[in-house]
Amino acid sequence: MDGARFMKVCLDATDPLRTGRFWADLLDLELRPYDNGECGVFGPDSTCVLWLNRVDTEKRVKHRVHLDVYTSSLAGLGALGAEVLVPAGDDRVWTVMADTEGGEFCAFLRSELPVRRLHGLVVDSVDAAAQARWWARVFHATVLDDEHGYSTVQNVPGMPILTMDFNHVPEPKTGKNRIHWDVAVPDTELLFDAGASMVQPRHGTVEWDVLADPEGNEFCAFTRPR
């Protein structure tokens, strides 16, 4: 199939502006609010990195998809409204934190911050290697397997994040993810041929199809010319 192109990461939020401000400040990026109450977090080249969708339901279970970020100060994240859930320790070099709506993310301390503070999009998976390979085929990207049980998809076209990581967990997905991603393809049928399934077809003014990957993770597919 022709390769898909990554567009952006989308977060569900009951208060998109508050949550969007948190993520914009954390990543040192620009927040752009819209009349519908939703907002985007944009990079210096006007690329939309994160989109905040308004939803009515609050978070109830652990995120199956989360973000990894770089920071120079956990206290600084706390001042933005984050909360420490699991401190770094043992073999963990990251701190598990929650954003202003309780959504988990992992913070990695760095004395010098890189320009891109958003490092990874992480997806819990029953079969991490198979999931990584599926998405690598979709994006025409490469896979690196780690001996600790996770697999990384690298060199994803259009992705404003360094890596897409699939982490092994024993439990299957049970509900809708509050974080998903958007992709662009010449033809949605290419994704069906690869093994994606339809969740909700485009209709009316909705210009995208909601699909699911082999483990049920939702993503939105937009059609773009070759």
Image (cartoon, grey):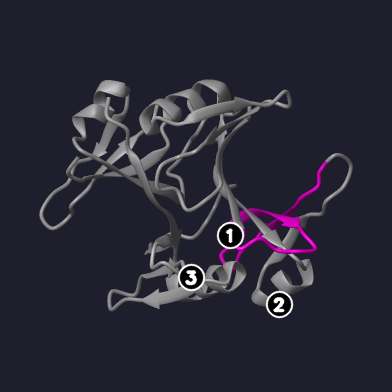
* Mark 2 / mark 3, whichever is N-terminal: 3
x, y percent for residue 43: 46, 66
- Going by the numbered disc 3, the residue's amino acid type is Gly
Q: Do the residues bearing badges 1 and 2 touch, measured as CB atoms within 8 Å?
A: no
Residue 202 at least partly seen: yes
- Is residue 105 a member of the stretch shown in magenta? yes
- The dot on residue 213 is none
> Main SS type for the magenta part?
loop
Q: Which mark is residue 20?
A: 3
Mark found first going from the N terminus, 1 or 3: 3
Q: Which residue is mark 2?
A: 79
Tell me if residue 38 is in the magenta stretch: no
Quadrant, the N terminus:
top left
Residue drawn at x 64%, y 56% as measured from the top left: 69
Q: 124 or 71: which is nearer to us?
A: 71
Residue appearing at x 40%, y 25% in the figure? 137
| Residue placed under numbered mark 1 in the picture | 116
- Separation (CA) of disc 1 from disc 3: 17 Å
Q: Amino acid at mark 2?
A: Ala
